[in-house]
Amino acid sequence: MKHKEKFAGMTQSRRQFVCASGAAASLFVTAPRVAFGQVGEPYRIFIAFPPGGTSTASMNPMLPYLRKALGAEVELEYKPGAGGDLAAITVARSKPDGRSLLFGHAGPLAINPYLAVQSFYDPLKELVAIAQVVQFPIVLCSHTRHGVKTVDELVALGRKKELIVGSSGNGSIQHLSGELFKRTFGIETLHLPFLGGGPVQEALVKGVLDVLCETGSNVVKHIAEGRLTALAVMGKHRLVVMPDVPTFAELGKPELDVSAWFGLLAPSGTTEAELGQIEAAVLRALSNDDVQAALKAIGGIPAPLNRGEFTSFIASEHKRWGEVIRLGGLNSTGSPTTRGVGTPQ
């Protein structure tokens, strides 16, 4: 299976990315490409994370089906950095020939535009949705040293002391999940942002954190090793990797429905014929039992949405997270409400 692993450099903060945007813009120019449909011209799917993570694991089982349906090589290219903006802008500025695609997520598509000092691009105008692929519901977990077994017990603890909630960075889906949890139950929290998933995992191991809102695949190991207790899934369905953990919908809080979602997008201006061909290939790949089983095995839920459905979903997420960010006073470097009491909804 062929992968091109290309790195754009060290991950930098959104503020640094703002300052460097002028110089970086020249890097987004792509070489001329041959006409759509020519045999041998590869499709490049840009991923906003380093190789080997959840995004790679999500795309790998689909690649053989996509190659067969599209009649060409499908390659994964990695452009981590700037909260996902680097990969998104690379695709947005690519030639709209259907060959440069983004494996997009909420960061660059629905969250970052509200956090950046200035807007580099408009994801709702410069990118066009093709199909959603998968969702990874967020799981609310408590550190086992507290002896908490239920959400009610965690909330009771949160009314007695300030809970330290960790995430992989300000504005990450994990951070915003914690904000929603805090506001829903009106408890006191202190958000500690880290520079990526590795540091937050290290802080967890060292016992720095009280609470973690994270995807199921990233907490299974810590649950098995006795560091975390999974309390509830922020979704409508239980996860295969933790079937005994209830959902917030089951607990009477259906509004706590948060997932790290992923899907394919192309540059605006890509023709209907090109979009339709890729959309059909993605949805057909997702209909295969082995692809669905592979996604479930890593804590995901296969979530095929067609172009119209995915477009509407992204717009709703854009609006939703903009409201959460506004109400929380959040920004790319922190917020005045990082420490404080949430407002019950």
Image (tube, rainbow, N blue to C red):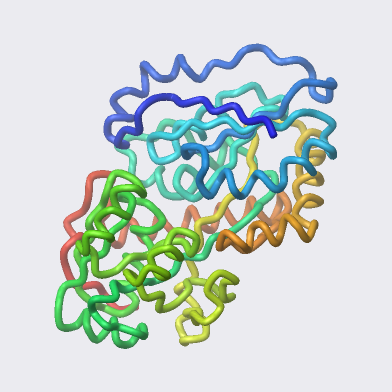
Give the left or right position of residue 116, taking residue 273 as reference: left
Q: Residue visible at 76% across and 15% down?
A: 34
Q: Nearer the viewer, residue 269 or 174?
A: 174
Q: Residue visible at 23% across and 76% down?
A: 145
168 over 157 or under it: above or below = above
Give the left or right position of residue 205, taking residue 134 as reference: left
261 over 43 or under it: above or below = below
Quarter containing the C terminus: bottom left
Q: Which of 77 and 82 is in front in this view?
A: 77
Looking at the image, the residue that sits furthest to the top is 32
Q: Which of 302 and 57 is in front in this view?
A: 57
Quarter containing the N terminus: top right
Q: Position of residue 262 (x, y in %)?
A: 58, 50
Looking at the image, the residue that sits furthest to the front is 225
331 over 118 or under it: above or below = below
Q: Residue visible at 49% across and 50% down?
A: 106
**Tag count in the figure?**
0
Q: Where is residue 98 in the image (x, y as percent from the top left)?
A: 72, 29
Q: Where is residue 196 in the image (x, y as percent from the top left)?
A: 34, 45
Give the left or right position of residue 290, taking residue 310 as reference: right
Q: Residue visible at 72% across and 41% down?
A: 63
Q: Where is residue 162 in the image (x, y as percent from the top left)?
A: 16, 73
**Which quarter of the picture shows residue 300?**
bottom right
